[in-house]
Image (tube, rainbow, N blue to C red):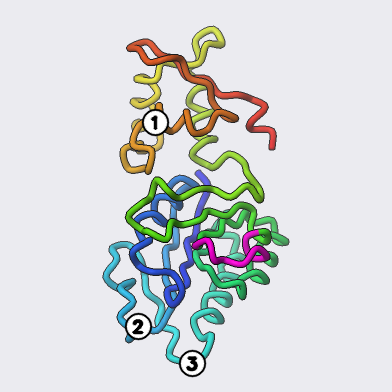
Amino acid sequence: MTRVAIFIDGDNISASHAARIAEIGRAEGQVEVHRAYGNASNGSGWDDIPGVTLKHAGTGKNAADLLLSIDAIELALTGAVERFILASSDGDFTHLATRLREKGITVLGCGEAKAPARFQAACTRFVELSANAGGALADRIATTHPGPTQLDRNIREVIAQHSQNGKGMRLVDLNIKMRERWDIRVSTYPEGNWRSYFTRRPELFAIDPKGPDAFVRFLPGGFSR
């Protein structure tokens, strides 16, 4: 499974987005590193989020940005992860995203609509976080670099292994196999169920009308991007 690092600009992104960012990370692969950077004394709330390590950067100007960038490059050089999630709406991370991609690393940016276009374009893909953190379903993936996620590729692998005469596999069986193989529960994602998940990705999957024997298939053309 793809190894993922999540780096959060804790002085720029609210801790109310923590759950959504974690969901994005799980959709991309196995999260090995999950950190937020900022001034630990400013009460941002990141130190209260389970699973997130808050790295205190001090009170200096741009201290969090600098420490995050240094740690990201150091981690990239070790080869320990293949994918980075940079959570920030700060255009100053444009150079970091560019440098990581030059090293062959996939960079998924996360931020609010105010994130500068240059930062969004520097990322392999960019996920816009809803200004209302409670409205996860309002989040949308920008079309800068659309393409299948690691979760989509995992689904394709399972369907390919269990396809019945090219028809795909039953939706109910897919749910079981995804839990057995990848420990993935679609209820933890914004869509809430597999039918909604596939319906929102018509370029990647085709699904039968509702019914106990509904099948789902992947579309090879959607995975060629």
Amino acid at the residue labelled 2:
Ala
The percent position of residue 224, horizontal first and vertical second, equals: 69, 33
Amino acid at the residue labelled 3:
Gly
Q: Is residue 46 above or below residue 24?
A: below
Q: Is residue 163 above or below residue 41?
A: above
* Picture quadrant of residue 147: top right
Amino acid at the residue labelled 1:
Met
Q: Which residue is mark 3?
A: 60
Q: Which residue is mark 1?
A: 178
Q: Nearer the viewer, residue 167 or 178?
A: 167
The percent position of residue 105, horizontal first and vertical second, equals: 64, 56
Q: CA distance from mark 3 to mark 2?
A: 12 Å
Within 10 Å of disc 2 (Cα), the crowding (few <14, some 14-19, many 20+) is some
Q: CA distance from mark 1 to mark 2?
A: 38 Å
Within 10 Å of disc 3 (Cα), the crowding (few <14, some 14-19, many 20+) is few
* Picture quadrant of residue 96: bottom right
At a point 41% along the width and 77% down the height, the residue shown is 55
